[in-house]
Image: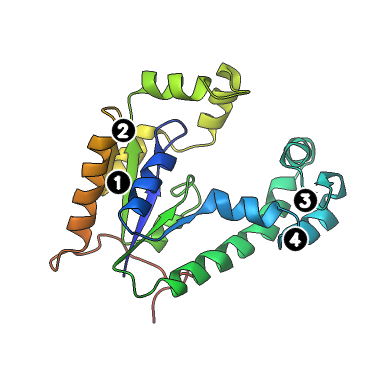
C-alpha cells in the first residue's frame, strides 16, 4: 500500500481535495475528524483532558473554545495537551492503516503534516495550492474569521512556499475542482504505477523504522 500524505494551508482547498480522493475510492484518514471524535461525548480524550483541564469540559465533551483559552493562558498547556492527545491520534491512525492494508493507496489528511513531522510516515506528499488572494477570500468568507485570526493561523503553519518545495505532488484548486479531480487521478496513476518509488525515508504507523 502507498501511503500518501495530504496537506495544505488554510483556505487552499485541502478538505475538498480529500473528498476527491475519497470519491476515487481511496480510503482517507482525517486528522481533524479524529480529534473531533476524540473530543466528542464518549471520546477517548474527554476523560484525560478533563483531568488536566477541568474547565474545558462541557456536557461531557471537550469545549474547544474553552480549551483554546486555557492553552493560551497557562504555560506548558500545549505540551500537556499534546502528551494526552497525540498518542490517541497515533493509535487511531495506526488502526486505520491496518484496516486498509489491502488498499493500493491510502491518504492521511493532516493539516500540520510538516509541522508535526508526520511526513516521515508517508511514501509521498501532495500539497494543495491556490493563489494567496483566493486563499484569503475563501478564509475571510468563513463565519468568525477576520484578518487577525487568519494571520494567527498562518503563523502556526509552515510557509506555503516551503510546503511546495517539499511536495512530491501539487493539487492546484484555483481552476475549479474538475481540474483538481484530474490532478488527483494523475497522482493516483503515478503512485500505483509499477515503477513508482517512494522518495521518503518512511517510518511505520507507530513512528518507527519498518522491520
Disc 3 packing (10 Å; few <14; some 14–19; many ≥20):
many
Vertical placement of residue 20 versus 101, above or below: above
- Which numbered disc flags the more N-terminal residue, 3 or 2? 3
> CA separation, marks 1 and 2?
15 Å
Say few, some or many: other residues with alpha carbon within 10 Å of mark 1 (under 14 / 14 to 19 / 20 or more): some
Q: Residue at x 34, y 46 (%)?
A: 20
SS class of the residue under badge 3? strand
Q: Is 181 left, or right, of 53 in this rendering? A: left
Residue 18, x across and y down, in percent? 39, 47
Which residue is denoted by mark 2 in the rendering? 173
CA gap, disc 4 and disc 2: 36 Å
Q: Secondary structure at mark 2?
A: loop
Task: Tell me which label, 1 or 2, sits earlier in the chain.
Answer: 1
Looking at the rendered image, the disc whose residue lies closer to the viewer, 1 or 4, is: 4
Q: Earlier in the sequence, mark 1 or mark 3?
A: 3
Answer with the quarter of the image where residue 48 lies. bottom right
Q: Residue at x 41, y 71 (%)?
A: 100
Q: Is residue 145 above or below residue 196?
A: above
Please tell me in which quadrant of the rendered image residue 108 appears: bottom left
Mark 4 Cα within 10 Å, few/some/many (few <14, many 20+)? Answer: few
Q: Which label number is shown at residue 42?
A: 4
Task: Indicate which disc, 1 or 4, sits on the residue closer to the N terminus.
Answer: 4
Q: CA distance from mark 1 to mark 3?
A: 36 Å
Residue 79 place in picture, x, y as percent = 69, 51
Q: Are marks 1 and 2 in contact (CB under 8 Å)?
A: no
Taking the spot 60% from the left edge, 24% from the top edge, the residue there is 143
How many C-alpha atoms fall within 10 Å of the one at disc 2: few (<14), some, or many (≥20)?
Answer: many
| In the image, farthest residue toward the left | 195
Q: What residue is shown with label 1?
A: 167
Amino acid at each position: 500500500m502507498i501511503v500518501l500524505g495530504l496537506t495544505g494551508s488554510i483556505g487552499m482547498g485541502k478538505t475538498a481535495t480529500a473528498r476527491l480522493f475519497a470519491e476515487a475510492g481511496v480510503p482517507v484518514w482525517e486528522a481533524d475528524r479524529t480529534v473531533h471524535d476524540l473530543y466528542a461525548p464518549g471520546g477517548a480524550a474527554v476523560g484525560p483532558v478533563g483531568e488536566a483541564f477541568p474547565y474545558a469540559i462541557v456536557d461531557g465533551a471537550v469545549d474547544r473554545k474553552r480549551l483554546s483559552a486555557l492553552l493560551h493562558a497557562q504555560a506548558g498547556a500545549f505540551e500537556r495537551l499534546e502528551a494526552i492527545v497525540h498518542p490517541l491520534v497515533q493509535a487511531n491512525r495506526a488502526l486505520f492503516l491496518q484496516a486498509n492494508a489491502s488498499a493500493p493507496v491510502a491518504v492521511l489528511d493532516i493539516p500540520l503534516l510538516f509541522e508535526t513531522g508526520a511526513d516521515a510516515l508517508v511514501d509521498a506528499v501532495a500539497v494543495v495550492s491556490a493563489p494567496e488572494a483566493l486563499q484569503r477570500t475563501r478564509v475571510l468568507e468563513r463565519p468568525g474569521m477576520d484578518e487577525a485570526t487568519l494571520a494567527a493561523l498562518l503563523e502556526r503553519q509552515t510557509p506555503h512556499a516551503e510546503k511546495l518545495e517539499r511536495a512530491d505532488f501539487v493539487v492546484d484548486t484555483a481552476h475549479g475542482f474538475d481540474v483538481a479531480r484530474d490532478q488527483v487521478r494523475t497522482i493516483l496513476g503515478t503512485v500505483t504505477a509499477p515503477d513508482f518509488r517512494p522518495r521518503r525515508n518512511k517510518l511505520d504507523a507507530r513512528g518507527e523504522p519498518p522491520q
